[in-house]
Image (cartoon, helix red, strand yellow):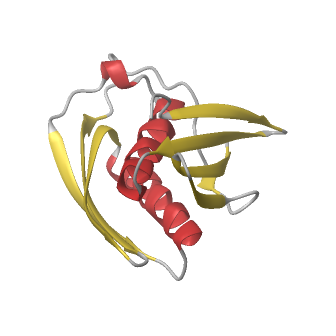
Amino acid sequence: MSKKYEFIEHTADLGLKAYGASIEELFVNAAEGFFDVIVSPKSVEEREERVIEVEAEALDELMVSWLSELLYIHDTEKLVFKCFEVKRLKGNQVEAIARGELLDPARHEIKTGIKAVTYHQLYVEESEGGWETQVIFDI
């Protein structure tokens, strides 16, 4: 799959569509797109690593939980990530590693602040070509 993600217009918010050949790749690409909203990934180095584990009742809820956990870490620890590796995605649980660094205002220009990951127009779907998700962020 050539396109990892794209941004979509949404009134007063920002939307993201992410794609993946596998469900694991979909979660990686959604996370990359999520942080591309916040800061340019080219300016982020892989200096810190976090293990992230989340679970939910359904796959679409798992996507929101995954991105919400990344937002929580960004907000509380001031980390920005650029590289993600899904170690296990089974049922409605995901375990992954995120790599990045502490936010440095001298090197990282904040593009957009995200307040929350929403359930509005949320979906995670499998098709013949792979997987697709749409997530709307409250900015």
Q: Position of residue 124 (x, y in %)?
A: 59, 60
Q: Residue at x 37, y 25 (%)?
A: 41
Question: Going by the image, does 92 lie left or right of 103?
Answer: right
Question: Going by the image, does 63 lie left or right of 138?
Answer: left
Q: Is residue 44 above or below residue 5?
A: above
Quarter the N terminus occupies: top left
Q: Position of residue 83 (x, y in %)?
A: 27, 38
The residue furthest bottom is: 57
The front one of 105 and 44 is 44
Q: Position of residue 53 (x, y in %)?
A: 30, 69
Q: Residue at x 51, y 43 (%)?
A: 19
Q: For residue 7, which quarter of the picture?
A: top right
Q: Position of residue 50 (x, y in %)?
A: 21, 54
Q: Is residue 96 above or below residue 45?
A: below
Q: Is residue 75 visible?
A: no
The front one of 27 and 44 is 27
The front one of 74 and 100 is 100
The residue furthest front is: 128
Q: Is residue 3 above or below residue 22?
A: above
The residue furthest right is: 11
Q: Residue at x 33, y 33 (%)?
A: 103
Q: Is residue 114 visible?
A: yes
Quarter the C terminus occupies: top right
Task: Count the marks.
Answer: 0
Q: Residue at x 26, y 59 (%)?
A: 96
